Every structure is written in C-alpha cells, then in structure tokens.
Image (spheres, rainbow, N blue to C red):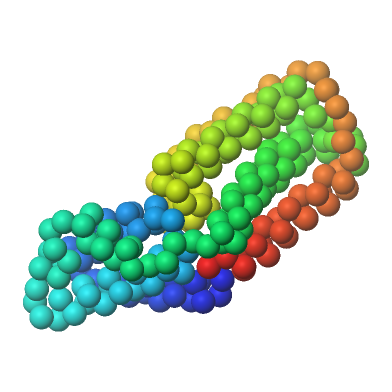
C-alpha cells in the first residue's frame, strides 16, 4: 500500500487503542464489512478514521456506540460506502496483478526455495533437485492459494491482498495449508522429477518479490 495509506493505518491503530471496549467492538464490526467492499485500501482506512472520530466524540458525550452509529451496522456501512468512489479500472488491474504475485511469492519463496533447501538441495548446490514431494506440495500450495484468491474476489468483489492484510482470520486460515505443504516437501521424498538452477530460481523469486513491493507502493 502507498505511504499515505500506511501512515493513516498506523494513526488508526493508535487511535483504536484509546477507544473503550464497546467502541472497539463496534469499530471491528464495521471494519469487517468495509474491508470486503470494492474500494481502495486508502478509502477503507479513511472510513475507519471517520468512524473512530464519531466514536470518540460519542464517548466524550457519554453516549453509547449504538447511539452514535445506530443499531443497524449493515445499513450504516451501506450508506457510507455509497459516498465512496469504487475502484477504477486501473486500480482493479493493479490489485488483480498483486493477487497473482502474492500467490507466486508463496510458491516460489516459501515452498520451492525453502523446501528444496531443507531437503536435498543444499548438498547438490547450485543444482536443486525437485522431488515428487516438493512438486506435490508446490501444486497443492498453488491450488489452495489460488482458490483462496479466486473465492475472495468472487464473494467480496475486492482484492485478496486487501483482505489478507486487513483480516486476521483470513491470514490464520492459510496456516494449516502452508504447514501441510511444508510437511509434504520435507518428508515425502520420492524420485527427483527435475533439477533447476538455484541462481535462476533465486533471481526469479527476487524479481517477483520486487514487482510485488513496487505494486504495493502504487496501490492505495
């Protein structure tokens, strides 16, 4: 995300800590709805900031969060989102590309590079043999991550990377699949299917991570 979005997010996190438990609970309910809307990360944080200010003002008056926001959180979020411009075509393309790079990052860096290094790659450096177990774990990771991305975009019409960084539950649900892939890569050896050059693999991984970082700066 851009520098202004990161700055606003840090400010919101700081202000969030000063809210009462009741206000914090209300803010988190609103955040869960806002983060699935097809708007930019900056607009999501802007809405959060406005909501925090509303809740702070209510606290100063001794009013409850329900009195400030209303009892129908869905209706409140709908009314707020109606005033926010949706993602432009350019922004949608950038977020879609980030989602693709996010999946490739995991497959190349975590699975292929890390698992090959732990299994039989170190003793064969700079040639890294890809075993059957590593190939299976790579395919599983690619399919699982790709499915998460596709499902998120279908159900929420927003970027998976936005959901991933805004929602702890989305991050936690990735852990069992990643551990399973790691176990497959390490313990299911099998025959060597193909050998690849370590420098080439590292170079490709670095390029993809660099592209991901650059895109992160371009997306609000």
Q: Nearer the viewer, residue 80 or 212?
A: 80
Q: Position of residue 146 (x, y in %)?
A: 58, 37
110 relative position to 24: left or right: right
In the current view of this chain or complex, which residue is farthest to the front? 89
108 relative position to 32: left or right: right
Residue positioned 72% across, 28% down in the render: 134
In the current view of this chain or complex, which residue is farthest to the top? 190
Figure quadrant of residue 64: bottom left
81 relative position to 23: left or right: right
From where the camera sits, is residue 202 visible?
A: yes
Residue positioned 22% across, 75% down in the render: 54
22 relative position to 131: left or right: left
Residue positioned 63% across, 47% down in the render: 100
User: What is the number of callouts on the image?
Assistant: 0
From where the camera sits, is residue 175 visible?
A: no
Q: Position of residue 8 (x, y in %)?
A: 44, 75
Q: Position of residue 48 (x, y in %)?
A: 34, 68
Q: Position of residue 172 (x, y in %)?
A: 45, 44
Q: Nearer the viewer, residue 199 or 66?
A: 66
Figure quadrant of residue 180: top right
Q: Is residue 197 above or below residue 21?
A: above
């Amino acid at each position: 995300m851009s520098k202004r979005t990161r700055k606003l997010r840090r400010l919101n996190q700081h202000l969030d800590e000063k809210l009462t438990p009741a206000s914090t609970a209300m803010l988190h309910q609103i955040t869960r709805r806002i983060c699935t809307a097809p708007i930019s990360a900056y607009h999501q944080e802007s809405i959060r900031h406005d909501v925090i200010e509303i809740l702070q003002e209510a606290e100063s008056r001794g009013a409850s969060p329900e009195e400030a926001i209303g009892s129908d959180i869905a209706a409140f979020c709908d009314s707020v989102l109606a005033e926010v411009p949706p993602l432009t075509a350019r922004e949608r393309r950038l977020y879609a590309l980030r989602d693709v790079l996010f999946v490739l990052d995991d497959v190349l860096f975590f699975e292929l590079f890390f698992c090959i290094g732990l299994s039989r790659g170190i003793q064969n450096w700079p040639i890294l043999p890809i075993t059957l177990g590593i190939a299976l774990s790579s395919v599983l990771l690619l399919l699982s991550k790709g499915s998460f991305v596709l499902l998120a975009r279908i159900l929420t019409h927003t970027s998976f990377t936005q959901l991933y960084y805004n929602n702890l539950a989305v991050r936690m649900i990735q852990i069992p699949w990643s551990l399973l892939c790691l176990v497959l890569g390490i313990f299911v050896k099998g025959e060597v299917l193909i050998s690849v050059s370590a420098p080439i693999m590292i170079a490709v991984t670095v390029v993809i991570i660099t592209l991901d970082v650059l895109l992160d700066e371009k997306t609000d």
